[in-house]
Image: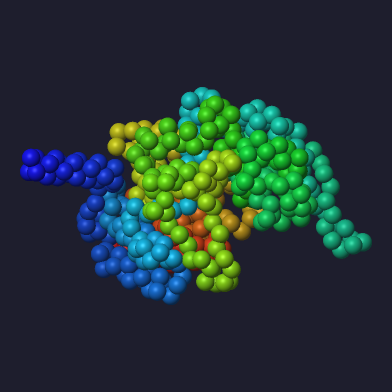
Amino acid sequence: MKRLIALLTLATWIALTAITWADALPTVAPEDVGLSSSKLARVTEVVKGEVAKGRYPGAVALVARRGKIAYFEALGQRDPQAGAPMTKDTIFRLYSMTKPFTSVAAMMLVEDGRIMLGDPVSKHLPKLANLQVSVPRFDPDSGKAVYALVPAEREMTIQDLLRHTSGLVYGNNTGNAKVKELYAKEGVDWNNVTPSEQIERLAKVPLAHQPGMAWEYSLSTDVLGRVVEAVSGVSLGQFFAERIFTPLKMTDSAFLVPNGKVVRLAQPFSKDPVTGNPVKLLDVTVPQKNDAGGAGTAGTAADYARFSQMLLNGGQLDGVRLLGRATVAHMTADHVGDIKVASSTLARGYGFGLGFAVRKETGLNAMTGSAGEYRWGGAAGTAFWIDPKEQMVVVWMTQGQPGPVRGQDRDLFRQLVQAAIVD
């Protein structure tokens, strides 16, 4: 009897292991896909050094090429207060790496014929019709900018939401002082508001730019999430689960980390090592007032690698197709062109597609990369990039106080990974 139980236990373990590995991309030696083992070892060495310096508690890094994982490491600590080591299945708050999920969801509805990129947003969210625009002009008497409200020359469209040319902004970052003031007055935000409150408050404030006339990183993707909900009739979290996460076997991605998985959630230092201020991040262990399409999800590096590989494959992975190849090509093309860039969030040499920054030139930017690569990151330390030329998917995850240092961390990692390409 004991032998039978042992055999059944072994069989169960093997079955569970098989499921785990079936959900991951296949793994190979770096040289099998044109990467250098010694250069990738240098990545590990440098990241360990950064952890030792106290830059961040720990990191999970994944590099895949030609559909196969060549580097996947968990380094440092998952929870510095508890002293728990980082593990490959650690769950991270993704912040703005939620935006590509929302963008894919919207494009799935485009392919369903339920929305069109040229649709005015008010077709689906009527309260956002007839918005005004806050226009600055220089007052020679006071020497300051004064603001006038004028009607929007056209309505913002679904394409504007996807590419951040809607005229919406993030209230704490915009250079339009009047819009910044009114966002604060009306409580416009993505966090701690219900979906209806978010739209009602946005309807009360002016746009910072005429729709289609300027690129400014913004609440556009959060509003896009509200469009997905209005058209689909389900919450954004349910749409993600049913149409993206479950089909792609992204088993740890969600807006809410359930009790059984909370132990795997990455935690930051209690105080920011740069400012000394307490670090407070989004609490993804309790239900939020809304499923924030621009910032609210959590997930693992392996899950995000599957999502990224789906995009690199032209919309499909392991026989499951989410989007058509032409749709992915459209999403990953530049949609900004000669539109004015009014935010430093968009790096030199990059335009913006329908959900992520798109590199237009191999040069111009200080960071090594290929024209056609697309990428984005999350404020609390996560990042990804997809390089069609090099057939690479790379995911980087840390957890810390949002700020410039997080960008420096990911850039150093990126520099080292790019150096590992040797074929």
Residue 391 spot, x, y in % from top left: 34, 50
For image coordinates 56% across by 59% down, the residue present is 280
Residue 44 spot, x, y in % from top left: 32, 67
The quadrant in which the N terminus is found is: top left
User: Looking at the image, is 230 positioned above or below residue 204?
Assistant: above
Residue 348 visible to an observer of this rendering: no
- Horizontal relation, residue 8 to residue 220: left or right: left
Residue 273 spot, x, y in % from top left: 52, 71
Residue 281 visible to an observer of this rendering: yes
For image coordinates 40% across by 74% down, the residue present is 52
For image coordinates 22% across by 53% down, the residue present is 28
Q: Residue furthest top?
A: 113
The one of 157 and 23 positioned closer to us in this rendering: 23
- Answer with the quarter of the image where residue 133 lies: top right
Q: Residue furthest front?
A: 1
Q: How many numbered discs sit on the rendered protein?
A: 0
The one of 171 and 156 positioned closer to us in this rendering: 171
- Horizontal relation, residue 405 to residue 156: left or right: left
